[in-house]
Image: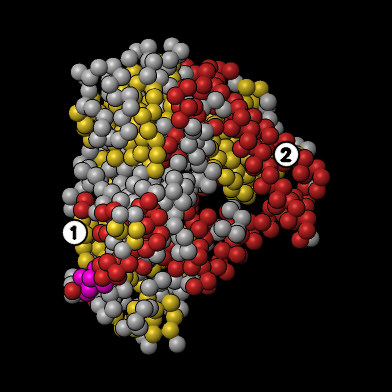
């Protein structure tokens, strides 16, 4: 087809998605959506083929595609203009119950021509804990309302009985209603813009463009894969829940123009809600694949076709019903994402042409802290600490990772301002800043994570409680590359100080200076009441290359900026600093000595 | 004629070699890590760790046995095997 028209329509499709995302953000009232950008919009062909994956959490692109196809199967012969469907069952297509998909058919002159889909993490889903993450859930039935597909809007009319039933099952129904309305508005905008597009260019041209776009992506990815040597690359992720250690093992094999992701050997499914369904694992591995390997290829079904996945049933990457999965999105999905990021990064590094596209693992471990209770205005408040979306950049082969630099699976993730959080919840920040020594060491270091501390403030009930799904406080997960170290580990500390005077800790500027007993926590529901404080630190990105090859002046600058400590400068980077100056001779001697120590050992036994 | 295996390794004359000093480490198409110099560092001993860190988890650094160039690293529990990256063709 005419390449100019093709290109114009392709870019118009991108704009359709972007405008729909803006609508989602503007209508939803939840911080997780409009501050954290835990959202996604995508477009599909009439048969559910992924046409264009948009921005937002990329874990959802393949799952929403399956949601679309599932709706097409379930409602065969009963899909009409103006309909809108809801699906959030993790064993049908969704990642967990809180991430609701609203799927909308798009008709043109009575003919079904496409679909749009979007998701947000709704304010509440009626799980045993507020906010949707249910660390102590025994099964998926304890994790809130779950639908394998229902019709929420019938030919333009909202089904009030369904609507009322949904809102009757959740906390904060007015906020959940706003979330649902934001998704309805989002789909309406997508539909409206798609129809305008078809009206301008004609249905045959539009349909030919769609087919060409998908075929082009498949061709381009297959051609790219042929550039790499055949081989296999392995990665491994550990995480823990209440002392139980889980592994996600991945062997990625590239043969010809195909990639196989094999998770054989991963841990059996857990009794805790960190499990992935197979749809979640699929989303987890595609989230880094899209931006790392297909950075210049349109993200659609064509990218999916050359990929095969082996995920043993009954494992933590393909659990069986009714395993609990509410923490999946910050649980095993992230480990799948990290493992895939590592193997793809290693394959990219095997070809000089793609060396600058290689990256260590970014922000490998979300911390889900959902606060709930009465706010300072006496109303109910539920919400996540959006710092979990602040992330940390993995190092590249030519530059350090970006400090607090986001994450690979969501290119638009971000955190709310401190003042925004303090306005929504009866809390006060003692501090929030970059975390020293959190970026993985390397010739190029990983970007730092961060740390924060909160205390109750002006709380009618004396404070709040929070749900903590903090797996991963024992193992680093932001793997390095080509010798680089992993980023530092998350940690969560509950400081209880029952005898302290009110306001005693108001000026504490470090964890050690907050008065009270410090208890490491990671999983469950905890109080932030009275004189309690909550301290959270989040992981840095992985490093790339040998830390002993890092420019000593960059190390000095990092020390000056308090990004790394004097100890790290010496022990990890082999750099001696005297006062505020670089000790050049001392650094040379130390690095020589550290290198000699390496081959004093013999054989990797 | 050499080809690239990774940022730190090349394949030359049917051998995996250190990209820095060209020292042969292992036959091409095989696992090379057992022939590298290995240092293990407990994560808990690295600046930036916390007391919550698992006491046994370690970072393995694999280096060239001839020149000490750092070739790769991996996070592992002591009982777990090396991660293998193997090229079967170019």
Residue A148 in view, yes or no: no
Image quadrant occupied by the C terminus of chain A: bottom left
Tally the marks.
2
Does residue A466 appear to the left or right of A28 in the view shown? Answer: left
In the rendered image, residue A249, in percent from the top left (x then y), is placed at 32, 56
Q: CA distance from mark 1 to mark 2?
A: 56 Å
| Labels 1, 2: one chain | no
Is A430 left, or right, of A147 in this rendering?
left
Q: Residue at x 38, y 73 (%)?
A: B8
The image quadrant of residue A125 is top left
A597 inside magenta stretch: yes
Please state the horizontal and vertical placement of residue A131, each as a whole percent of the image.
41, 27
Give the magenta part as a residue range: A592-599
Is A129 located above or below residue A202 in the figure? above
Report if residue B4 is visible in the image. Answer: yes
Q: Which residue is mark 2?
A: A193
> In terms of depth relative to the viewer, which is nearer, A346 or B20?
B20
Q: Main secondary structure of the magenta part?
A: helix
User: Which residue does the image show at 74% across and 51% down from the upper left?
Assistant: A9
Foreground: A40 or A25? Answer: A25
The residue labelled by disc 1 is: B78
Q: Against A163, is B78 above or below? A: below
> Does A376 lie within the magenta span?
no
Helix, strand or loop for disc 2: helix
């Amino acid at each position: 087809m005419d390449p100019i028209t093709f290109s114009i329509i392709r870019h118009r499709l991108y704009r359709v998605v972007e405008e729909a995302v803006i609508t989602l953000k503007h209508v939803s009232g939840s911080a997780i959506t409009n501050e954290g950008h835990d959202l996604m919009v995508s477009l599909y062909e009439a048969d559910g083929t992924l046409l264009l994956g948009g921005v937002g959490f990329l874990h959802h692109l393949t799952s929403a595609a399956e949601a679309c196809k599932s709706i097409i199967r379930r409602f065969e012969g009963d899909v009409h203009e103006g309909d809108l469907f809801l699906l959030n069952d993790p064993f049908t297509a969704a990642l967990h119950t809180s991430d609701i998909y609203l799927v909308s058919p798009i008709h043109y002159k009575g003919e079904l021509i496409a679909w749009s889909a979007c998701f947000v993490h709704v304010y509440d889903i009626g799980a045993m804990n507020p906010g949707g993450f249910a660390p102590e859930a025994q099964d998926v039935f304890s994790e809130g309302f779950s639908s394998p597909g229902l019709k929420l809007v019938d030919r333009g009319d909202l089904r009030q009985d369904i609507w009322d039933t949904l809102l009757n099952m959740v906390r904060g129904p007015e906020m959940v209603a706003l979330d649902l309305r934001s998704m309805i508005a989002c789909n309406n905008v997508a539909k409206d813009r798609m129809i305008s597009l078809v009206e301008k260019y004609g249905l045959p041209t539009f349909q030919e463009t769609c087919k060409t776009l998908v075929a082009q992506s498949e061709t381009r990815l297959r051609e790219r894969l042929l550039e790499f040597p055949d081989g296999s690359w392995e990665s491994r992720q550990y995480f823990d829940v209440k002392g139980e250690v889980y592994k996600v093992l991945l062997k990625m094999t590239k043969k010809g123009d195909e990639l196989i992701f094999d998770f054989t050997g991963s841990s059996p499914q857990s009794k805790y809600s960190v499990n992935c369904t197979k749809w979640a694992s699929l989303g987890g591995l595609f989230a880094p694949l899209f931006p790392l390997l297909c950075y210049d290829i349109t993200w659609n079904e064509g990218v999916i076709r050359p990929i095969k996945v082996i995920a043993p049933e009954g494992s933590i990457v393909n659990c069986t019903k009714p395993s609990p999965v509410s923490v999946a999105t910050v649980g095993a999905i992230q480990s799948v994402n990290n493992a895939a990021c590592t193997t793809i990064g290693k394959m990219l590094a095997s070809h000089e042409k793609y060396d600058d596209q290689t990256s260590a693992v970014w922000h490998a471990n979300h911390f889900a802290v959902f606060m709930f209770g009465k706010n300072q205005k006496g109303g109910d408040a539920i919400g996540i600490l959006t710092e979990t979306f602040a992330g940390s950049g993995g190092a590249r082969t030519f530059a350090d990772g970006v400090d607090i630099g986001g994450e690979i699976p969501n290119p638009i993730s971000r955190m709310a301002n401190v003042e925004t959080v303090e306005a929504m919840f009866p809390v006060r920040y003692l501090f929030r800043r970059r975390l020293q020594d959190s970026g993985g060491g390397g010739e190029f270091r990983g970007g730092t994570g961060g740390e924060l501390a909160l205390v109750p403030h002006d709380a009618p009930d004396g404070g709040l409680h929070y749900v903590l799904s903090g797996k991963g406080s024992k193992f680093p997960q932001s793997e390095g590359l080509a010798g680089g170290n992993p980023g530092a580990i998350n940690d969560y500390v509950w400081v209880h100080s029952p005898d302290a005077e009110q306001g005693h800790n108001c000026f504490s500027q470090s964890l050690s200076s907050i008065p009270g007993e410090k208890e490491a926590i990671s999983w469950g529901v905890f109080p932030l009441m009275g004189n309690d404080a909550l301290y959270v630190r989040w992981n840095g990105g992985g490093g790339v290359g040998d830390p002993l090859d890092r420019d000593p002046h960059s190390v000095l600058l990092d020390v000056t900026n308090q990004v790394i400590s004097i100890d790290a400068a010496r022990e990890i980077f082999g750099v001696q600093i005297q006062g505020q100056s670089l000790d050049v001779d001392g650094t040379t001697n130390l690095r020589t000595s550290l290198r000699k120590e390496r081959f004093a050992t013999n054989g990797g036994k | 004629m050499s080809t690239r295996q990774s940022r730190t390794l090349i394949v030359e004359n049917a051998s995996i070699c250190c990209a820095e000093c060209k020292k042969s480490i292992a036959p091409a198409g095989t696992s090379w890590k057992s022939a590298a110099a290995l240092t293990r560092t407990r994560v808990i001993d690295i600046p930036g760790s916390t007391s919550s860190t698992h006491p046994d988890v370690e970072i393995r650094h694999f280096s060239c046995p001839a020149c000490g160039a750092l070739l790769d690293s991996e996070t592992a529990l002591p009982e777990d095997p090396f991660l293998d990256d193997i090229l079967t063709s170019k």
